[in-house]
Amino acid sequence: MADSAPAPAKKGGIIKTMAGGLAGLMAGGVGMYASAIFNQVAKPPRPVANFAISAEGMTVTCQNHATGQSGWWDFGDGSPLEPYTSEQTNVPHTYTKPGNYAVKLIVRNFLMEENERSVPVDLSTTGTAATAAATGPAIPSFSVEPIGGVATAPATFRVRGEVRNADHVIWDLGTEQLEVGDSKGIFEKLVVFEKPGPYQVQLIGYNGKQAVKRAVQVNVSEARSGTFSAVVRVTDSGTQIDRKETTQTLTVPLPAKGATTIERAISVRPGHTIAEVRLGKVANPAMKSMRVEIAANKKTAKVIGEWAPTGKESSSQAGGGTDVLIPFTLVEERARPLPTSTETVATQFTPEGSFILANPTDTVISAMLPLPPVPTGMTDFKRLMQFEIREITPDKQMRVIGALPDLKPPFRATVNSSSGRPQVVDVQLIQNGQLRVTLTPAPTGRS
């Protein structure tokens, strides 16, 4: 049999093998070249998982200072992971029950390099329901005393006391309405009883599972004919400024070779503004001339410093190095409208022994009205005082003989009583936050 010709496929295989090897060499060369360019020019910085935490009640707010393109938040309570984005400033999370948790942040760059940080959060000893349930609510002290010792309607009583380990405080003043608030701790308030009768003032502390109650019985007597009383209704308005101070740390990656400055942003919690930023001591000696610039809107601030590394810092940076830690104290403010409320204070006039005139019917009488304290941390504060002088007529009826919709002490006026004898009303604001009101019979004319 004659020899057959060489198969064309074999020749093609040789050509393919040569082409593949050449392509591999070219790809390897291009890959090595591209990798060198990528590492020197386009390689992104390492991700840094950095954040600060502030807590208010059961809500924790994570203030994002991290760098990275992607990642997630793990709040350690079994809730779904929340995605991380570099645009986030504040990440709030509300826990459903007290306890100890660990908030973890994991960030990545687009090369999938990772960095993570975990911060413990203790919500078990912040006056929450768990603490209250463990110890139980308590009312160590509770007293109800009439102002000036006068318990004649209308009468004002000063209520003092203390409530511990309670989430809510319930007031039962013996009337048809209950007051529910959160006035925990030591408190003082004024309570007015407009009509005579027995009243039971009850205070209840409640923490969701347990309650404690204390009660005081008071008796308000009926006013006699011809007596006078003073009543003032106080309405406060304005803006209250809450301040919160926290100590935090900025983690700043070492700058690239040749860089001379470091700049990092600080943000605040939602609804707050920056009042002050105080820088702490930076351990890295390469950081010089640190300063803070607060934005005009006071929502953000920049920490700026000069980077002047020695040979040691330069070599550390070249090998990947460590981050620069910048401690600082942040003072935040939050403005909120003062809740509108009106408090009433009333008391009877009593004779002033040193002001008895020649005629016994010409006795000067006075009343002291303690005003509610001015709330702290206020701006644009305004106080409206509506003022009345009341008289019990001979037929046991209460009659308003003088009223002023906006009292501004000092004030003086003349009112007419049922006796026909005009009375001079004199109102003074004295230093201890009280109104001193006097009624002086007007001089009688001579024929």
Image: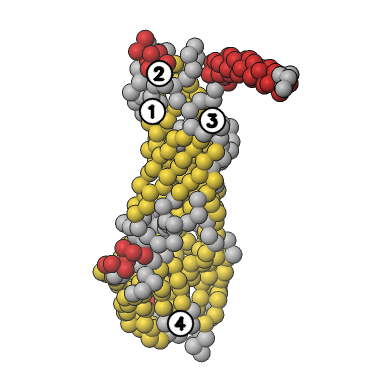
| Amino acid type assigned to the residue bearing label 2 in the image | Gly
Image quarter (top left, top right, bottom left or bottom right) of the N terminus: top right
Give the alpha-carbon distance from disc 4 to disc 2, as whole Å: 76 Å
Q: Nearer the viewer, mark 3 or mark 1?
A: 3
Q: Quick check: marks 4 and 3 in contact, CB under 8 Å? A: no
Q: Label 2, secondary structure: give it.
A: loop
Q: Residues within 10 Å of mark 4 (few under 14, many from 20)?
A: few
Q: Position of residue 183 (x, y in %)?
A: 39, 64
- The one of 56 and 16 positioned closer to us in this rendering: 16
Of marks 4 and 2, the one in the foreground: 2
The structure residue drawn at horizontal position 39% and vertical position 66%, both measured from the top left corner, is: 167
SS for dot 4:
loop
Q: Nearer the viewer, mark 3 or mark 2?
A: 3
- Residue 53: quadrant of the picture: top left
Name the front one of labels 2 and 1: 2
**Disc 4 marks which residue?**
175
Looking at the image, which residue is at 53% across and 52% down? 336
Cα distance, mark 3 to mark 2? 18 Å
Q: Amino acid at mark 3?
A: Leu
**Residue visible at 44% across and 65% down in the picture:** 437
For marks 4 and 3 on the same chain, the one whose residue lies earlier in the sequence? 3
- The residue pinned by badge 1 equals 325
**Circle 2 residue:** 319
Measuring from the top left, give residue 103's x and y in whole percent.
41, 47
Q: Are marks 1 and 4 in contact (CB under 8 Å)?
A: no
Say which element carries label 1.
Answer: strand
Disc 4 marks a residue whose amino acid type is Thr
